[in-house]
Image (cartoon, helix red, strand yellow):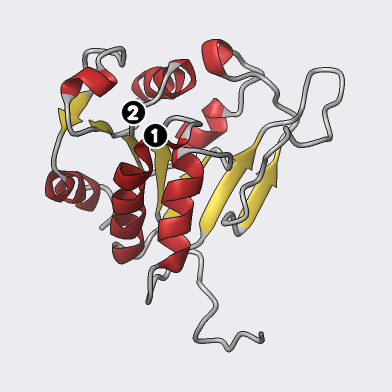
Amino acid sequence: MSLSCETVPTLSRYTVGVMGSGTAEHDELAHDVGELIADLGVNLLTGGGGGVMTAVSRAFVARPGRRGICIGIIPCAGEIDRVTPKPGYPNRFVELPIFTHLPRSGREGTDDLSRNHINVLTCAAIVALPGEQGTASEVTLALRYRKPIVAYAPTADLVRHFPKPVERLDRLDRVAEFLRRYIR
C-alpha cells in the first residue's frame, strides 16, 4: 500500500496525553477518547504500551480525516539494559515511538528514571483514564508541573485514588470542552 500526501498524518502544534491502565478493562472509554482527540486535530501521546494505551491509539489512528500523529514514549526493559524496549512496547498503533533509557514505572512513576516526566511535560493537556499506581503517578506529576489535567471515568470510584485537586469528569462532551481550552 502506498500513501499519498493526503493520507499521511501531519504533526500538530498541540499534543494531548492520555494516561491510563495497562490492562484492557477500559477499552471502550479509551476508544471514545481516541476518536475525540483525532477529531480535535491534535497529536495523541501515550506511554506506548497495552491496555488503555493501545485502545486509545487504535481508535485515534483509525479515525477518518485525523490530522495528528500517535506518539508513544517507550520505557526500556530494565536498569541494566538501557537500550532494549520493555516487552510489548511500542504497541502497533504508535506512529512515532520515542525510545528512552528510562525503566521506572508504576509505584516508582515519579522517580527521575521514569518516562512519566516526558509523558506529562510534552502535553498541552492530559486526560487521565482509570488506572493504578502508574497512572496516579502521572496525575501527580501533572499537578507538580502545573499541566492541565482531568480524570475521565463513568464513576468517580474508578479514579478515587488520584490526587484530590484533579477535576473528575463523567461525560465525553465535558472532556472535549476541557481540551478545547488548551489547544486553540
Residue at 29 percent across and 62 percent down: it is 40
In the depicted view, which residue is nearer to us: 180 or 105? Answer: 105
On the question of residue 108 being in view, the answer is yes
Q: CB under 8 Å between callouts 2 and 1?
A: yes
Q: Which quarter of the figure has residue 168?
A: top left
Residue 175: x %, y % from top left? 20, 44
Secondary structure under the numbered disc 2 in the rendered image: loop
Q: Which quarter of the figure has residue 178?
A: top left
On the question of residue 12 being in view, the answer is no
Q: How many circles with numbers are drawn on the protein?
A: 2
Residue that numbered label 2 is attached to: 130
* 3 relative to 35, above or below: below
Q: Amino acid at mark 2?
A: Pro
Q: Amino acid at mark 1?
A: Glu
Secondary structure under the numbered disc 1 in the rendered image: helix
Residue that numbered label 1 is attached to: 25
In the depicted view, which residue is nearer to us: 100 or 57? Answer: 57
